[in-house]
Amino acid sequence: MANKTVSGSLFKKMVTNGAVNLKNNHKEIDHLNVFPVPDGDTGTNMQMTMMAGVKEVHNLDSQSIVDISKILSRGLLMGARGNSGVILSQFFRGVYSEIAKIDNGSATVQEFIQALVGGYQMAYRAVMDPVEGTILTVVRESAEKVLREQPNLNSVEEVLKMYLEQANETLIKTPDLLPVLKEAGVVDSGGAGFIKIIEGWMMALNGQMLSESEASLEAPTMEHFHGAEMLGNVDIKYGYCTEFIVKLHNPEKFSEDFMKNPLSQMGDSLVVVTDDDLLKIHVHTNQPGVALTLAQKYGDLQTMKIENMRLQHSTIMNMDQTNPNKVEKAKAKFGIIAVASGEGIHEAFKELGVQTIIDGGQTMNPSTEAFVKAVEELNAEHIIILPNNKNIILSAEQTLDLCQDRSIRVLKTKSIAQGYSSLMAFDPTQELDDNIEEMTAIVDTMRSAEITYAVRDTEINGVKIKNGEFIGITKGKILVSTPSRVETAQKLLDDMINEDREIITIFHGVDAKEDEVLAVVEYAKKLNPDIEVDLINGKQEIYSFIIAVE
């Protein structure tokens, strides 16, 4: 019998079945990665994100779709891995934002359609520069199709049948929208993964429940923290932690920039959040009264809290003196979190001042929760995060919303080489903004490259690639592919080294032989006899060489 509504119990079955179906097929999604390298991880990231959400709702004793979607959204956000995982979590956050509006525990056909629309809208908002031909296009066109046909859809089954049909049609045309997909001969992996989820929903509606034994309800964990304490004097530049909520007079005419712009000039740790007619502000400043006065221009103060952080620090220090058995560690001015894989790379980052290392990278994207835990464990006034992978940046940036009481900056490093080079510019005696500016400048001017092996035959950017060859990647593109690891490295160095370059750092991996390392060094010196070479046994997997040139 067709379902006219979606209850909490039915929605729970649907999302669980979708997660299991994705998990059972995630390797197929991984293989759709545009680059023919052994790090295709879209399917892995998406299924791990979904399983984190399913874990949260598994033991939830509620028949309300509002409760189920709320807990699911929170679980997905905390477990989101990689760009695809973050986008997926935001889709379900948008679904919940619409479901939260219903008056009972079940969603009608019309309400369910609107939830799908809310999902695509929230997913688009989560991405700074949305790109068509990706999962975003798949979720948008599918939702728009069922919204247009809403008068003709009388059951949840009919909605999802049409939704899935449109999703498959859109997926097929993603190569026409995104040239890099067509060149690689693949469809968008994120969109393909999303379709696996919806297929699982359809199977649940038809009574075809996949065995839970096929997927562990324990979300996989890969985070290993390697902490090193860094003590220092507490330097409180802005003394008052100021928080308040304002009920806006004209919320439809209010822009968050009205408060962001002036407050960013008079403090730090700034968070500005609007929710309907409410405005919430958190800022560290020496002028709390001015901040309150600015806010009162736009509405009425509902709550406020102002704490003198310097006084709190002084009180804690006095307590320490009167209680010799209690030892409080001084808060460091800076704490740095970096994502890295490889024992030697871990050590190299620690030597440059990184306190916390999250084990991860390609094929092993850390979750948002991993970053939140790392932030919470750091006793530092300011925290700098180095994702060191373009697919990890979004997960790292989620900490800005989830840890609003902390001063956090995410430096958008896209490789180990960029992260390592940026640390050369870090100066613990400087202010946060000065450090970020200097580190960003290094990232913008240095060159980085990686050498790995191809896992299939293809052609990208005019480069013909054969399975098993060594491919050289720089500036996010495959530059060269040859049967020789050394030859590939040499062609990369031809593109990277000139007489103006001063330092080259080479992280060699577990599969790089000593004679190959020496051959690469010799070639670098041939191109620029004055260049300084820094060799590091990174002991990393997948990448034979990771190269940084400054």
Image (tube, helix red, strand yellow):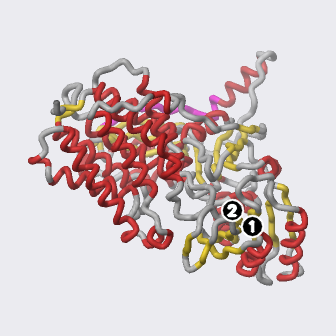
Q: Nearer the viewer, residue 304 or 354?
A: 354
Q: Is residue 268 visible?
A: no
Residue drawn at the location 72% of the way across and 20% of the way down:
319
Q: Is residue 177 visible?
A: yes
Image location of residue 84, percent across then percent down: 47, 51
- Quarter holding residue 427: bottom right
Q: Nearer the viewer, residue 421 or 512?
A: 512
Are circles 1 and 2 on residues that touch, CB within 8 Å? yes
In the rendered image, residue 308 lying in the magenta stretch gets the answer yes
- Quarter holding residue 296: top left
Image location of residue 241, percent across then percent down: 53, 37
In the image, is 116 to the left or to the right of 271? Answer: left
Element at badge 2?
Answer: helix
Q: Is residue 36 above or below residue 223?
A: below
- Residue highlighted by disc 2: 418
> Magenta span covers which residues?
300-312
Q: Quadrant of the N terminus?
A: top left
Q: Is residue 528 above or below residue 183?
A: below
**Type of amino acid under label 1:** Ala
Image location of residue 518, percent across then percent down: 90, 69
Q: Is residue 1 above or below residue 89?
A: above
Q: Residues within 10 Å of mark 1 (few under 14, many from 20)?
A: many
In the rendered image, residue 431 lying in the magenta stretch gets the answer no
Q: Quadrant of the C terminus?
A: bottom right
Q: Earlier in the sequence, mark 1 or mark 2?
A: 2
- Quarter holding residue 442: bottom right
- Residue highlighted by disc 1: 548
Q: Main secondary structure of the magenta part?
A: strand
Residue drawn at the location 64% of the way across and 66% of the way down:
467
Residue drawn at the location 47% of the way across and 68% of the way down:
185
Gap between marks 1 and 2 measured at Cα: 7 Å
